[in-house]
Amino acid sequence: MPAAAELPLAGLTVVDMSQFLSGPYCSLRLLDLGARVIKIERPDGGDLSRRLYLSDTEIGGDSTIFHAINRAKESLAIDLKNEADLKVLRGLLAKADVLIQNFRPGVIERLGLDYESVRKLNPRLVYASISGYGEDGPWVKRPGQDLLAQARSGVMWLNGDEDQGPVPFGLAIGDMLAGAACAQGILAALVRRGITGQGSHIETSLLEALIDFQFEVLTTHLNDGRRLPRRSSFRSAHAYLSAPYGVYPAKDGYLAVAMTPIPKLADLLSLSDLAPYRDKPASWFTARDDIKAIIAQRIATKTIDEWLAILEPADIWCAKVLSWPEMLASEGFRSLDMLQTVTREDNVSILTTSSPLRVDGIRAKVDRAAPRIGEHSTKIREEFGL
């Protein structure tokens, strides 16, 4: 494992004023690349995600989601309604490299910590803002929450079977995608700062990230007479792609089948019922549901391993659908070495994921759990002379 000093962002200080998921996810990615992340929290309760529970599990007084997304960060308790504390924060920002904030539009201006104000303190600062819907338009003051952003972005309408109605993703994809996009912008701004010596203001939102997430299908829609795709009514996996693209139940689980020519699949599955569609590629779209129903009946007659033994040697793109226990036990997952245990002095111990990036062939890991509220306040104030 590379030492912290060897990672690409070693020596950079990130001040994270954000809460919940999008901003903290962004700063987590920077931390995994070697940056020091100082998390600004309210003295009375801290980041609201400390009480955002995905289950009834609580560790060290905080939710598992808080621990997952704030590992190895430092916590500086700041009362944003207290002028003395705001002075401390301004002093820190004058010496920092990056600031991340995801307040609702208008709040950061009332605090006097908007980009133009902070830029006067530190022209080299890379200032990053994440909002729900951007800085203009009718939705600006609406709650920038992931489910609501999914609803407004079209991605929820695109997901699921035709007769299901809108289907949200089972993850906070807007938050995570916005955080990842913001991290990319910050890294680009840091590169430019290395050339010009000047900072930048990076802005994104949950809505922008979710729209970008759909760039492939939206581009098709915009340049195809604006025809709307029709989701498959049977085992839908993509609003546009033809049969056999989908997930099919086998005797002992589910088999995912990606892009595959129907004639080749018909031969391997011994499916004479697909004969009318063999040489009519257009029908793979227009008769998508009928074709998939025929394939599903056949897949259901054998186990996953039986089908994989037939399909994989023929270079058919397919895979068993794994549950979490199956994925975690798989050699494919274990070979990645993507788990780490982080701890804290108050007997907190968390098994969590590690960075998705490898630097010079090595995945960086940390051993420090998420901080207690204000845990590092005294140390940070002394270090920066605040």
Image (spheres, rainbow, N blue to C red):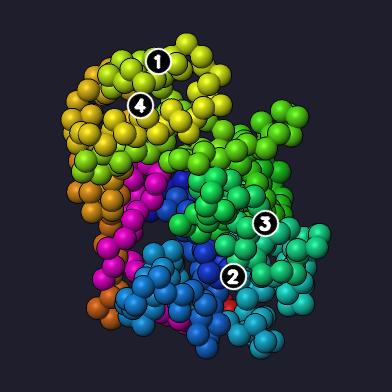
Residue matched to label 1: 275
Quadrant of the image containing the C terminus: bottom right
Q: Position of residue 198 (x, y in %)?
A: 71, 50
How far across and how far down the image is residue 288, in percent?
49, 30
Report how far apart the C-alphas of labels 3 and 4 lie in the structure.
Answer: 33 Å
Q: Disc 1 or disc 3, which is closer to the eye? A: 1
Q: Label for residue 121?
A: none
Q: Is residue 365 magenta?
A: yes
Residue 229 covered by magenta stretch: no
Q: Which mark is residue 152?
A: 3
Q: Residues within 10 Å of mark 4 (few under 14, many from 20)?
A: some
Q: Residue at x 76, y 65 (%)?
A: 140
Sequence-wise first label, 3 or 4: 3
Marks 2 and 4 in Cβ contact (< 8 Å):
no
In the rendered image, which residue does mark 2 sit on? 17
Q: Which residues are magenta?
A: 349-378
